[in-house]
């Protein structure tokens, strides 16, 4: 019986990728743009004319991603929304624009928006000791707090000094702990207490407990539930009618909830999150798009629906202070990005401040990083953003660096790497896999099979620069 079910599930998943359902009445131009992104996914590095383009459906089928919803915003409007696959494989329920997904850590910048709204109202300040506001639980004083204090700015930007771990989830039959019990590590919490492990403000360390402190902070200063505060300050003003931080999931969203699936497409049982600010939001991709539209309108037009321009200027600060998003300053533009992951769900937002454009993608799968990277590049290419676009190279026809001199062994991120000049070409071996390298400049080579760009420095042959498929710069050192 299990074999038959597995076969039926496989056939069901394959059939859903034949076509994407277009949920909005796109203009011809916007529909064409959406199609271009959907059908033109390429590696970050490739050889011109040699790399076949793949579609979102190709990636979903390869990586066993059951369902996906994707929304693009453009200058204050939802330009288009595309949905793919199934929110529940067993019931054959298709993803629609009203399907809600767990937003994971994309909840954090939404929560930060509410905290900043309280700054605008004068209820909170960005740089005061949060212990001035906390009531039920306070930051324990220790050697790290002698000279510096935990502040709201530091909580939002992950520089408050808290440890890092992901909080437990709970079945509907289990008693869920309060935020104060989680912060203190008291039963029925299953997790360690929140604690400072370095001086506040000293450096960046991504921290879920820091956002749990933010949740307690908002509850204490508003004297109402976190859910009510977020509804009042963010969700309702943004028009997010299909979203909620309520845990367990709100009744009006329960029937629209996607089922989360593992990388091998096994369903996760439903679990409630005792936390909210750091990863408890259920939302549609359209609703997250509406939040971004409202935030960007506040920034560009001073509409003050969510925040003042004074605060949005700090969110989208060219110095990249992480007051909600990861930021990159690129020429005259600011790029913003945030990802999210709860078991069975992944999501990301990625956009251009100056262009007032952004993409929101939500899925019910653990296995999406490669697809997200490809969608990000396809969006940047289609809308001609001057960053994160794929790079296609011509084969270099000139004389290259002396291949015998660089035919050496290296250690790369714990892997064995060897370069060798052979009769049929120049090869790179990583552990037990071999890849043919194609010259793209005198001292640069490309590995088309795994999208690695290799750069040799004639003045230092003991170290090799390697650009990975996700755009990260790494080095390999001679063994």
Image (cartoon, rainbow, N blue to C red):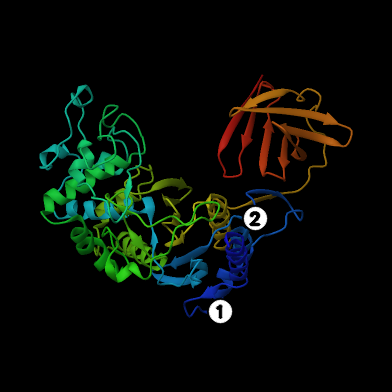
- For the view shown, which residue lies furthest in the right direction? 423
The residue tagged with tag 2: helix, strand or loop? loop
* Residue 296 drawn at (x, y percent): 35, 61
- Quarter holding the N terminus? bottom right
Q: Residues within 10 Å of mark 1 (few under 14, many from 20)?
A: few
* Residue 287 drawn at (x, y percent): 36, 66
Q: Considering only vertical position in the picture, is 475 above or below 225?
A: above
To which residue does mark 1 refer?
A: 28
State whether residue 241 appears in this view: no
Find residue 320 and report its image quarter. Answer: top left
To which residue does mark 2 refer?
A: 42
Q: Residues within 10 Å of mark 2 (few under 14, many from 20)?
A: many
Q: Is residue 259 left or right of residue 244?
A: right
* Residue at the image point whose x is 47% and y is 77% from the top: 24
* Residue at the image point whose x is 73% and y is 54% from the top: 51
State whether residue 69 appears in this view: yes
Q: Considering only vertical position in the picture, is 36 above or below 377?
A: below
The residue tagged with tag 1: helix, strand or loop? helix
Q: Is residue 122 left or right of residue 354?
A: left
Q: Considering only vertical position in the picture, is 442 above or below 44?
A: above
* Residue 431 drawn at (x, y percent): 69, 31
Find residue 173 and report its image quarter. Answer: bottom left
- The disc placed on residue 256 is none
* Residue 370 drawn at (x, y percent): 57, 50
């Amino acid at each position: 019986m299990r074999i038959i079910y597995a076969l039926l599930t496989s056939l069901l998943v394959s059939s859903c990728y034949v076509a994407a359902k277009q949920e909005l009445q796109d203009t011809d131009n916007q529909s064409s743009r959406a199609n271009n992104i959907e059908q033109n996914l390429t590696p970050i590095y490739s050889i011109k004319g040699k790399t076949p383009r793949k579609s979102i459906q190709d990636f979903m089928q390869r990586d066993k991603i059951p369902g996906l919803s994707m929304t693009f915003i453009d200058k204050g409007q939802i330009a288009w929304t595309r949905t793919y696959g199934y929110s529940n494989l067993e019931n054959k329920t298709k993803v629609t624009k009203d399907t809600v997904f767990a937003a994971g850590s994309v909840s954090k910048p939404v929560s930060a928006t509410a905290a900043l709204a309280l700054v605008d109202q004068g209820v909170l300040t960005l740089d005061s000791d949060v212990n001035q506001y906390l009531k039920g639980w306070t930051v324990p004083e220790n050697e790290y707090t002698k000279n510096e204090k935990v502040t709201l700015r530091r909580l939002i930007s992950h520089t408050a000094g808290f440890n890092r771990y992901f909080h437990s989830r709970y079945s509907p039959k289990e008693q869920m702990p309060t935020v104060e019990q989680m912060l203190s590590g008291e039963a029925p919490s299953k997790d360690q207490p929140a604690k400072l492990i370095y001086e506040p403000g000293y450096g960046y360390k991504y921290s879920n407990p820091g956002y749990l402190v933010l949740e307690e902070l908002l509850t204490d200063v508003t004297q109402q539930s976190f859910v009510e505060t977020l509804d009042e300050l963010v969700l309702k003003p943004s028009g997010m009618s299909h979203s909620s931080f309520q845990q367990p999931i709100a009744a009006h969203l329960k029937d629209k909830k996607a089922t989360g699936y593992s990388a091998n497409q096994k369903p996760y049982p439903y679990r409630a999150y005792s936390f909210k600010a750091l990863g408890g939001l259920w939302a549609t991709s359209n609703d997250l798009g509406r939040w971004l539209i409202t935030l960007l309108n506040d920034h560009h037009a001073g509409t003050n629906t969510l925040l003042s321009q004074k605060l949005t200027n700090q969110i989208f600060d060219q110095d990249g202070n992480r007051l909600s998003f990861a930021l990159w300053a690129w020429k005259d533009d600011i790029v913003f990005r945030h990802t999210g992951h709860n078991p069975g769900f992944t999501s990301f937002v990625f956009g251009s401040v100056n262009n007032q454009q952004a993409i929101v993608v939500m899925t019910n799968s653990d296995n999406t990083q490669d697809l997200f990277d490809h969608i990000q590049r396809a969006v940047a290419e289609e809308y001609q953003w001057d960053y994160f676009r794929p790079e296609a190279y011509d084969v270099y026809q000139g004389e290259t660096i002396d291949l015998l001199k660089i035919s050496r062994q290296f250690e790369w991120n714990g892997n064995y790497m060897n370069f060798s000049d052979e009769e049929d070409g120049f090869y790179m071996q990583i552990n037990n896999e071999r890849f043919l390298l194609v010259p793209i400049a005198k001292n640069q080579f490309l590995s088309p099979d795994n999208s690695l760009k290799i750069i040799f420095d004639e003045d230092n042959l003991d170290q090799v620069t390697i650009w990975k498929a996700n755009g990260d710069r790494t080095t390999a050192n001679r063994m």
